Structures are given as C-alpha cells and as structure tokens.
Amino acid sequence: MVKINKVYTRTGDQGDTGLVDGSRVAKDSLRVEAYGAVDELNAGLGLARVWNDRGKKDRASRWLDGVLRKLQDELFDLGSELASPPGFDYPGKFVVGAEEIRALEAIIDRCTAETDPLTSFILPGGGPVSGFLHLARTVARRAERDVLRLVRDEPATGTQVLAYLNRLSDLLFVLSRWAGKHRGETEYLWERGLRTHAAKRRSASRRPTTARASRPASGKAPAKRKGGPGRGRKGS
C-alpha cells in the first residue's frame, strides 16, 4: 500500500531521483524521460475526463469515462514498470502484455465501426473532449519515442511497452472522433487533403478506358492476312 506523508523530501534537489529499487538516476535519464512522458499522458486523459463529465450525463459519456479511467490506471501501472530497472521484481508488479493490447484493439474496432470513414486528415479540436484526447494522442506518440530510446539503451525493458503505447495512440485518435460524434461536435478536416482527394477522383473519372479488340461472333480470332510485308523474313 502506498503511503505518502510528505510531498517534498529534498533528496532530488541536485537533479537526481529514486527508482523503484531504491537506486538513484539523473532526472533527465532515458528511463525518467520515458515514465515522465507516460505521467504527462495520464494527466492529459484526466483533463479529457473532466470535460467529459461536464454537460450531459448520457450512456456514451459514462462509457467513455469508464474507458479513460481504466487507461489511467494502466498508465500508472506502466509508469511503475518503467521506473523499475530491468530484472527488479516485487509482489504485485504489473507488466503490460498481449492481453492489454488486445483490449485496446477491441475498443478501437468498436469505435471505428460507429464513426464515419475518413476522407482526409483531421484538424485536432472540435470540442474540449475531442481536443484533449487529440493532445493526449500526441503525448502518447512522444512517450513511445522516449521508450524506444530507452529500449535501444536497455534492451531488457518490457518488450510489450512499445506495442501498447503504439496501440494506445491509435485508440485515442479513434476515441476523439467517437466522442465528438456522440457529443455533436464538428469534425474539421484538412482542406488541402480534401482537395487532393477530390482532384484524384476527378482525374480517375476522366481517364479513358482501353478499348478491347473485338472478335467475330463465332468467338474465333480473325485469320491472319497472307502476303503482308516482311513475310518469310528471318528474325522478325
């Protein structure tokens, strides 16, 4: 059980911090950068939850709150995993795995089925909930990059962490669209992308079709004409 009696300890005043095993590392080390980005991501989800709680309390809003709260719990677990040096275990330690990734994919599939197909990239925004989910998505991508650098330096870092963050970013994108639709928010698309897509469709519609050679009604190919130019020449 976590028990915090005092917020400040003065132990980190020289720019180092303690990991779960008690060892000390610099606050700008790869490991601290990685779980720090995960912590920032968690805060972004908290803001999305706050705005989701405002206004109507319908079934969709309650479902989204449950999803985001579960993600926040998992991100705390993930932060603890990243704050533990490779090989250090303790009772109840959480390690993200295939089960958590499959759960994210199931939510992605559900929300994708309930939103319209995309015809261009989306401009982040539309409303507070969608906007904060888009912001959280970008932080998730940064956390993924930070973890990638850590994995390159310490290959023993959890093998599923990268896949989890990659899928989580995808989920936050889909959730932002899903939330906007259910809240009646406008979805703004990248205009240049729309124009490019429309131009490609117009070009394809004007493209002439290749005429196919006709065959006689009998279905047999026309007979070759005898005595044509070059007849009997070798190597033709």
Image: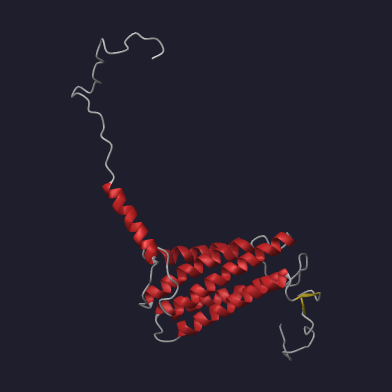
Task: Tell me what residue is drawn at x 80 percent, y 76 percent.
Answer: 22
Is 88 situated left or right of 225 in this image?
A: right
Total numbered circles = 0
| Spot occupied by residue 23 in the image (x, y as percentages of width and height) | 81, 74
Q: Is residue 209 above or below residue 196?
A: above
Q: Is residue 231 above or below residue 45?
A: above
Task: Tell me what residue is drawn at x 46 percent, y 71 percent.
Answer: 175
Q: Is residue 90 above or below residue 4?
A: above
- Please say whether residue 63 is visible from this viewpoint: no
Task: Tell me what residue is drawn at x 46 percent, y 67 percent.
Answer: 174
The colour scheme is: secondary structure
Task: Tell me what residue is drawn at x 43 percent, y 79 percent.
Answer: 61
Q: Residue furthest front?
A: 229
| Spot occupied by residue 5 in the image (x, y as percentages of width and height) | 73, 91
Is 128 situated left or right of 143 in this image?
A: left
- Please say whether residue 219 is visible from this viewpoint: yes
Residue 221 figure quarter? top left
Q: Which quadrant of the rendered structure holds the C terminus? A: top left
Q: Which quadrant of the rendered structure holds the N terminus? A: bottom right
| Spot occupied by residue 170 in the image (x, y as percentages of width and height) | 51, 65
66, 136: nearer the viewer: 136
Is 193 situated left or right of 209 in this image?
A: right
